[in-house]
Structures are given as C-alpha cells and as structure tokens.
Amino acid sequence: MRILLVLAHPLSESFAASVARTAREALEASGHTVDLLDLYAEDFDPRLSEAERNGYFDLPYDTSAVAGIVARLKAADGLVLVFPQWWFNFPAILKGFFDRVFAPGVAFTHDAAGGRIVPQLTNIRLLYALTTTGSPWWLVHFYMGNPVRRLLKRGIANFCSKKLVFRMISLHDMDRATQARRRAHLERIRRALAAV
C-alpha cells in the first residue's frame, strides 16, 4: 500500500516526530511505500482563504492552492495521522489540513438532492491516528467523551471514505509519561503498523 503519513507538530525533536519515524520504519519494513507530509516542515498554511470559502459550493471546487497535497492524498491507499491533542482537539495546522484539503470534489461531493454528502476518498482503505494527550485516559474518555476520536471516526472517516479500517492509538497523560512508557508506546505503534 501507499501510505500518506501526516505529521502535525512544530518541533522536529518532539515525541510526535519519534512516533512518525517509528510508523514510517514499521510500514516500510512491511513493504509499504510511505509519503511523509510534515505540515510544519513543508510550511503548510492552515488558513482557509476567502476565495476558498466563497467557492465552497462551486462545481468544480478550486483546489489549485493545495493541488500538490490533494494529489498526494488521492495517490494514497492509507492515511496515518501523527499529532498531539491540544485542548482536546487537533493542532490548528491539522484542522487547517482537513479544512483545505478534505474539500468538495476531493474528500466528498454534495448530494444534488441536498443535505447529505457523498464520500469521494474511496482510495483510502485505512485511517490510523497516532496521538498523545496531556490528560489522563479517564478525563479524555469519561469527562470529555473522546472528541478527537469521534471527529475522526464518525465525521472524517465516515463522511469521506467507505469501509475503511479506523484505529486510534493514544498515549495519555503524556506530560508525566516516563521514558519506559514512551518506549512501550512506540513499540505498540511498531507492532500495530507491522500488521497493516
């Protein structure tokens, strides 16, 4: 498979960068081709422009400003996202990636009858989210209702693709994670992606 591996963290020596390296190594060791899209390193602009918003319902929608990334997404069979959760949500750069790249005509089309959207990323057969949270597991799940998982699985995955394999692997309470817990998390990711 061809995997688009999206990294959303501003620090090149972050734990997220280690997760991305581990993911890439595991996928390539299993024979997959990996296209690394480091949003910060590639200076991705997350801001939806006035022209992009004004043309949201135009047919066809103009994706020329992000055409290179759209081409990489359309060439992929799988999508692996690596990011920290900040304030129980995506980093702004990753949200902007969804806003600008997962656009009409790329990720979905509007149903001519109105209301519903029709998935267009039928090439994407798997979506993995490899993430960390500063909060403990119980707070993310019980108090907040795991909002990032809901957004990815019920929103983005279900509305943009059909019958894909979704998995989210999280390291909770990251701010207090020991080196041993971090190493164990990287090994968990390695094992999960080696099985893809």
Image (cartoon, rainbow, N blue to C red):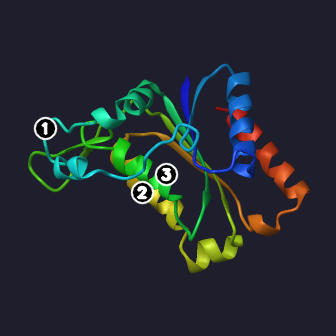
- The residues bearing labels 2 and 1 have C-alpha atoms spaced at a distance of 26 Å
Q: Position of residue 109 (x, y in %)?
A: 22, 42
Q: Secondary structure at mark 3?
A: helix
Q: Which residue is mark 3?
A: 94
Q: Residue at 75%, 37% (x, y): give it.
A: 22
- The residues bearing labels 2 and 3 have C-alpha atoms spaced at a distance of 17 Å
Q: Which residue is mark 2?
A: 154
- The residues bearing labels 1 and 3 have C-alpha atoms spaced at a distance of 25 Å
Amino acid at the residue labelled 3: Leu
Q: Which residue is mark 1?
A: 59
Label number found at residue 16 = none
Q: Is residue 159 left or right of residue 136?
A: left
Compare residues 3 and 164 and report the one nearer the observer: 3
Task: Tell me: residue 30, above or below residue 48.
Answer: above
Q: Residues within 10 Å of mark 3 (few under 14, many from 20)?
A: many
The image quarter containing residue 95 is bottom left
Amino acid at the residue labelled 2: Arg
Q: Quadrant of the C terminus?
A: top right
Q: Is residue 187 left or right of residue 45?
A: right
Compare residues 181 and 113 and report the one nearer the observer: 181
Mark 2 or 3: in front is 3
Q: Position of residue 175 (x, y in %)?
A: 77, 67
Q: Secondary structure at mark 1?
A: loop
Q: Is residue 149 left or right of residue 61?
A: right
